[in-house]
Image (tube, rainbow, N blue to C red):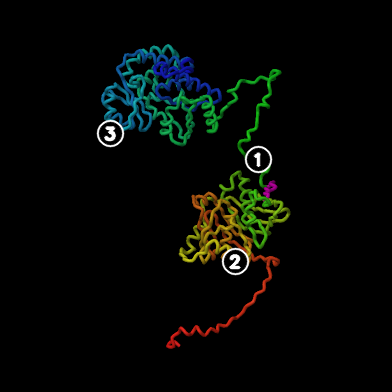
Amino acid sequence: MDLIVNATEENQIGILNNYITVVAIQVALVDTLRHVGIEPNGVVGHSVGELGCAYADGCFTGEQVVLAAYWRGRCVLDGDFPDGSLVAVGISWEEVEKRCPPGVVPACHNAKDNVTISGPAAAVGEFVAQLRADGIFTKEVKFSNIAFHSPIMNKVGPALHAALEKVIPNPKPRTPRWISTSIPEDNWQSPLAKHASAAYFVNNLTKSVLFQEGLAHVPKNAVVIEIAPHGLLQAILKQSIGSDATYLTLSKKNHPNNLQFFLTNIGKLYLAGSKVTLSTLYNPLTSPVPRGTPMIAPLVRWDHSSDWNVAKYNMFLNSASHTGTTFEIDVSSQDSKDYYLTEHTVDGRVLYPATGYLVLAWKALSDLHSSNFDHTAVEFEEVVFHQATILPSKGSVKLNVRILEFGCEFEISEGSTIAVTGRIKLADATKHELKDLLAETVKHEEETIKLKTEDIYKILRLRSYDYGPAFRGIVEANMSGTKGVLNWKGNWVTFWYTVLQFSVARNSIGHLLLPTKIQYLKINPKYHLEILGNKEHIQVTLDPVLNICVAGGIEVSGLKATVAQRRQDRLKPSLEEHHFIPCEDESCFESISPRYI
């Protein structure tokens, strides 16, 4: 315990201390996982990590695994070895086998293009120099100048076997969940591979580590937990298993708070779908508690640093019993989020825009499906505007939206008066039928004369459409009214209304028209924002024959507008006079030559 708690760079350099502390931490982490209800479906070890596999598989006790690590380190220290070297190289296992000179062997198959070579220091050094000359990645693995997993280690085999037989007098059989990385898969049914015996771990020290072959048995969508003091193998695991798996480590070197790091990853383990019983980490509570035990209530305080949506009862009711969603529209204050609606003035009155109703129905449907409305594609059919809603300068207007479960019908009412009815449903965000149809019907002709914003809204103002800046979204339009450019201001109500303006403006010759029916309308917000990108303008196309208008992710078909009577009190009487003034200036002919007369 002192080696773990008071670890320093000096006391961790030696093999013996390193083995003991690593294995002890592995035992502690495995025990903690078991304590919270986590049992592995499979275990894979790298080199000495197979000692941890033996403990996780139930073949070793905690005492046995620590003693096995001790004798492994002690026998290696007592061995009289020539200077050896371990170097990681960035080529495949097969390529290393072909290129290795005598005495140098591939020791660890870490990944597809990551192999650790082992052997005498001089031979390994010459081989590494050749690889570097060929531009191949190499990195020395500093580990006491000993050539692990090479024939050199056969020298300590008998001593290690004798010591481990005392630690493991009755070897237990390995279960199928323990995937061996020290014995080739072809020999997994051999007597050597069936038990966690002294012979098995001598073989583990002297033979190559087939880690890549072992990882091939890990499911691609597994939750992979590295049991180690530090996550050294994370890059190799991700490269070998793939991106569909979840990778976690439970401790991290030099982390300021490893307890917090551990609990954070336990939380990630829970989010990945594992059943974690955190209550076992706390001291058991005995009841009744002693008199004088302080209450916990005064220690709890509400955290008001973040704003969250409050769940309401109507979110959990089905549509059949749904009483509707009520939206309050208030334009009486400049601080109100709805104040921009005062710029929608028609015939001298502030009217609630037609597209405002549609956005309310859109929001209500999204609430029923527990989704954000600006991420939900919807379709409207047979929308009928029965009555316009006048917004008062003082007070507010409440609009109630009801969506029926069957038939997808909706209605929007102000008090007891129906304002809008129609059908609404979720749409297929991958299809754009009207846009594809317009691409074939609208001719791609360039017109040199184009109407600008000032020209368009001057014409509309003469027809009693007195729009403010928020509702002046048409940037330009051609003379035939089939193509134009609209301005996107981040407001669905105003942009949607601008699309209707473009459709109506072409036909409203001298008349005040209000939309009364829309046969079909679709909005795909995600597709709309993808087309828009970082731009502020978007193209709009209108087919007057098919009565189809498309702008970005909005498709409108079958818009019908009805002539509305203008208020007579707004017409100011005027007196006009027409005078004819004859031109009697005879001097105008003096400059003309007689020959032209």
Q: Is residue 23 visible?
A: yes
State the extent of the magenta-drawn residues as a range: 320-329
Q: Give the CA distance from mark 2 to mark 3.
A: 77 Å
Relative placement, left or right, of 267 versus 131 is: right
Q: Nearer the viewer, residue 388 or 86?
A: 388
- Callout 3: SS: loop
Instruction: Answer whether residue 468 is magenta in the image.
Output: no
Dot 2 amino acid type:
Ser
Q: Position of residue 569 (x, y in %)?
A: 71, 66
Q: Give the CA distance from mark 3 to mark 1.
A: 64 Å
Q: Residue at x 29, y 24 (%)?
A: 124
Relative placement, left or right, of 404 versus 231 is: right
Residue 508 circle label? 2
Of callouts 2 and 3, the N-terminal one: 3
Of callouts 3 and 1, the N-terminal one: 3
Q: Residue at x 42, y 16 (%)?
A: 11
Q: Where does label 3 land, which residue?
A: 134
Q: Nearer the viewer, residue 410 or 289?
A: 289
Q: Position of residue 190 (x, y in %)?
A: 39, 22
Dot 1 amino acid type:
Ala
Residue 311 circle label? 1
Find residue 577 and report its image quarter.
bottom right
